[in-house]
Structure formats: C-alpha cells, structure tokens
Amino acid sequence: MESTKPDAIGISPSRKPFRIEKRHNGVERPLPSPLGASSKLDVIQYPQYSSALTRLLWSGTPSRVLIVIKPSSDDHTEDFLAIVKWLGRGKKLQVYVEPFLFSKYESSELPLLTWSNEEEAQDVKSSVDFIVALGGDGTLLWISTLFGEAVPPVIPFAQESFGFMTCFHPSDHRTAIEQVLQGGFSITLRSRLSCVLHDSTTAQSHHLGLALNEVVLDRGPSSYLTSLDCFADDTFITNVQADGLIIATPTGSTAYSMSAGGSIIHPSVPGILFTPVCPHSLSFRPLLFPDSVTLRVEVPEDARHNAWVSLDGREKQEVKKGDYLLITTSSWPLPAVSSQGDLRDWFTGVIHNLSWNTRVRQKALL
C-alpha cells in the first residue's frame, strides 16, 4: 500500500494543462488565451458559444485522479473497487480519495493516496487532473465545495438513478474514463455563483463560497415575510416581500427554483435566475438576468426581522438589517464530462426525472 504522504506531494508537478475548443457545425473554435499564467484550469473562465459543443484537449498525459463518492451509502463499494484497481494498477495513475474513505481501506492492498492536513489537501487539489464522481447530483455539489477556484473535469457516474448531472453508469466506467484519458471529450461548463456578505456594522466583507445550484435567502425561523431590497448593477429593481428569494444558476434551475415556479434553463445558457418563494403579490414573476450582472440583495433597516442565507442547502447564516449580499457569476465553472453531448444529456435528465411534457399522443385524422 502506498504512503499517505508521498515524498513528492509538496513539489509534485502541476495539473496537466489542457485547452478548450468549441465545435459548431463541424468547425473548431479555440477559446481565447487564459488571463494570466497559471497551471490551474482558468482556461475555462470564458463564456461559451451558445450552440457549440465544448471539447477538452490535454496538453500532457493525465497522471492523477481524485475519486469522490457518496459517504452515506455502501452501494458504491463494488464499482469503487473496480475503478480503483483499474486506474491504479491497470492505468498506473495516482488515485486519491478523501481521508474518511482512505481510512476504511487503509489495511487493504488498494493503490490509494490521501492527505492528512489542509496544506496537503490544497496540493492534491491543485494537481489532480480529473475527478471520478460516484453518487448522485449531491456528490457534484460536494465536489463544488471542495474546489473554491479551478475544478478539474468531473466524470459523473450515477449510483442509483440518473440525475440531472450524473449521465454515466458505473458499468461503463472503462469506456468513459478511457475517453477522458485520450482527450477530445465533450464537457458542460456548469456556472457557479460567488456570494459575498457585507457586514454594515463592521464594514467588512466575507466570501461565503460558491454555489453550483443556488443562493437562497429566506425568513428563517421568523413568521414574518422577508423584506429584501434588490439591485442589479446598482440599479434598484424591487423590494421582495415573500417567504424568500432564490438566485440560481442554470444548473440549479431544475432544483429549488423550479419548485418555486422558476423557468428550466439549459446549463450552457449564460444567465442567473431570480425566483421569489411565495411572494405576496399577484404580479411577481421570476426573471432571468444575464450572467454578467452583479446582484445586490440587502435587508433594509425597516425590515421586520433579519434574513438567512444558504448556498446549495448548506448551513444557514444570518443576514442582519443593513447587511447585503453581492452575488456574481464565478470565473470558475464546474466542467462536467458529457456522455452524449450536453443537449442530449440534459433532455434525457429532464424527461426521465420530471416526465416533462409526457402525454398520450393524438391520433391522426382519418
């Protein structure tokens, strides 16, 4: 068994660089050069052509992989072991897992690596070439929290049923991963939202993190309606009087936002959804902003109570009167590998999971 602390972990080679191309009607369109010199995945900061197929091409041979699994289930065991043995022994890759999973298999002969402190964790995250996700959509949400900036390409395998983001079956892991190792595979760049909380009392700002699905402000334990003043690029839009407000990515459009009446948006559409939760109004319709906008949501001084904010359903934080949130589209999307192309994968999820527009077809007129 390999050591938990490889000698080269602190000075290991950087993640293999790669470039992104757009393919539209058979024509390749390379993206512009990244801003600044970096070995991280900042090459995927740029918006995509709306009707293009995004492909990833390696500039070197991938050598490190991180496997992330759903920790609360043992259903992944057989698939996990098969993937680890094939990647570690067959493909000679360095296979990393999170510490809780490493401890479970520490006494085995599996070729696994992990980290023991935050510094080592950052070294691993900055050098991993791609990620294998075993679980469901929630596993990709967890991966989003692990990577505060650049995210390596993620191959999402569905453990139980296919979700909106998990488009591969574990039984096809060799075919899917082999395609990734060779390069030239298609990816969906799933935008994330950056959320910054400004404290009016201390005049300090705190970055709350990145949301792959949505940022939610609600009334928390209070029985009063939430009062929120909303601005787009410093232009006042409206005062929200509702149970809450959902600001979602296109990826999150099939989650909480949809349940609250928001539109369903393809993840490649660059935009930010603005969806009220049970507004006390007959005319408050959900909106879709361009992804370039900066949204400012403030709890006014005359509000009856404070609000609460959460990112992707994680722990809530209180937003006091006078405080405000700045929400923007992050420069660091999550690149998810596509199985049949992002359009077909997305429609498969919408139709399979939501039974979208399912009805008996009319018979032809005689």
Image: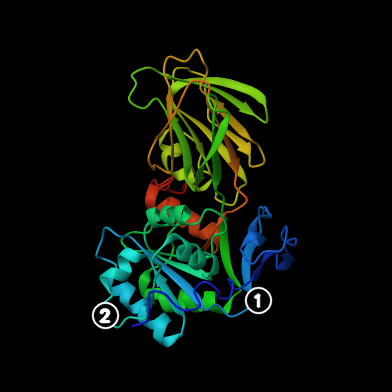
Categorize mark 1 by other alpha carbons within 10 Å: few (<14), some (14-19), many (20+). few
Asked if one can make out residue 117 in the rendered structure from this viewpoint, the answer is: yes
Where is 106 relative to 218, above or below?
below
- Residue 89: give its label: none
**Hey, what amino acid is under mark 2?**
Ser
Q: Position of residue 365 (x, y in %)?
A: 47, 46
| Residue at screen point 47% across, 17% down | 281
**Hey, what amino acid is under mark 1?**
Ser
Q: Image quadrant of residue 158?
A: bottom left
Q: Quadrant of the N terminus?
A: bottom left
- In the image, is 308 to the left or to the right of 25? left
Name the residue tied to disc 2: 108
- Residue 59: give its label: 1
Q: Position of residue 180 (x, y in %)?
A: 53, 74
- In the image, is 15 to the left or to the right of 139? right
Q: Nearer the viewer, residue 303 or 264?
A: 303
